[in-house]
Amino acid sequence: MKRVLIGFFLILAFIIARSQSVNTQTAYNFLKEATRAKSLDEKQKKLAEAQKYIDEASANAETSTDAKTWFYKALIYINLYRLSPNDSALFSTALTSFKKSYALDTKQKFTEEIKVNVDTLRQNLYQKGVDKFNQRKFEESMNQIELAANVYSIINLTDTTLLLTAAVAAERAGRSDKARDYYVAVLKAGKNTPDIYFGLTVFYTKLQDKKNAYEVIKKGRELYPKNQDLIKAETNMYLAFGEDNKALEQLKLIATADTANPSVFYAMGTLYNKVYNDTTKTKEVRKDMLDKAVLAYEKAITINPNYFEPFFNLGIMYNNVAAEILLKANNLPNDATAEYDKLKLEADSYLTKALPYLEKALEINPTDMDTMMALKQIYVRLKQTDKAKAINEKISNLQKK
């Protein structure tokens, strides 16, 4: 009698296990029928049946350790997701199922099919991300591309190209925190590119995190010593941290390789100009900085004759030199007439130098109020009455708008 009972229990266990295995196959059969369905309604019904049977199989201890169960579940849920693309839970279940199947597939019966499906998913998500990027929906683009990169992790691979693309989208979206995470993930994956060090340097510089910014740019420059983007990132880093001398040296380095970039020479001019404005420097040093600033600004203008900033800065610089000379003249004793007249002539000569630069700046940007106000003061000072009246009317008209 005991033997009969034992045999009965063994048969019962076999029947239960087989019924769960049948659930897996039944689910797959419904999936095949869904793919052949001629109407959306029929497709939905077949997939609903497939979902019911595969959920039972994946929840049962007898079949939940079978790679086939999870592979079929992944396929079913991907098809369900395609019908309801806003249901992220369906997509998440599909990815989890692929991952489980891949891990359980020790005999590699489904490995190649999983890889093909994962790669197809990755490409589709990436294309959606690109489409969003082209529509300037950068945060949505970032999320789609990140999802595409995460899909690849199912088969234990890191798509560093996708992560770098996601970083670009993140930066455009103003999500420098996410961009940082992507760059770090790429580094952890063992890939080094100038873009990574550039992006991380910009990120830490924005945060005023000097320690990390220095560490990142040092490593990047060691690996890519001639990369112009990294040299520029280092220059901007020095500027952000107030290290003007280091920034100037970097700009000189850039200028030797990028002789046709007006912004490089403009930046050099602003740094020379800044040193000139430091009244604690000696007269000789300030004069040298003034001359170098003029040369740098002029170089920028030569490269780009419609570059507003160097025209404006040159005009304002000459105007400030004149103001400094006039201040010195006004502080003279009343009986120092000859010296006063000499200084006044010198100041007027600098104002005369300033005029063509400021007039060109106004020609480039006709509504710039700072330029107009500076011109008004110079015209009055040089007794150019008609020009002073004209610019004053222009200022009044703009202020009324």
Image (spheres, helix red, strand yellow):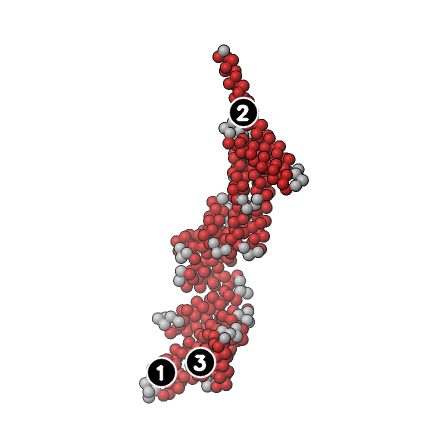
- Of labels 1 and 2, earlier in sequence is 2
Using the image, tell me which numbered label, if any, was put on residue 209: none
**Residue denoted by label 3:** 377
Q: Looking at the picture, how far across and down is residue 147, in whole percent? A: 53, 46
Number of other residues with Cα within 10 Å of mark 1, as a class: few under 14, some 14 to 19, many 20 or more: few
Front position among marks 1 and 2: 2
Q: Are marks 3 and 2 in contact (CB under 8 Å)?
A: no
Identify the image quadrant of residue 26: top right
- Of labels 1 and 3, earlier in sequence is 1
| Figure check: 326 above or below 90 | below
User: Helix or strand or loop: what does disc 3 sit on?
Assistant: helix
User: Helix or strand or loop: what does disc 1 sit on?
Assistant: helix
Horizontal placement of 52 versus 267: left or right?
right
Q: Residue at 44% x, 80% y: name it.
A: 377
Amino acid identity at mark 1: Asn
Amino acid identity at mark 3: Gln
Q: Closest to the observer: 304 or 64?
A: 64
Identify the residue at the far right of this view. 38
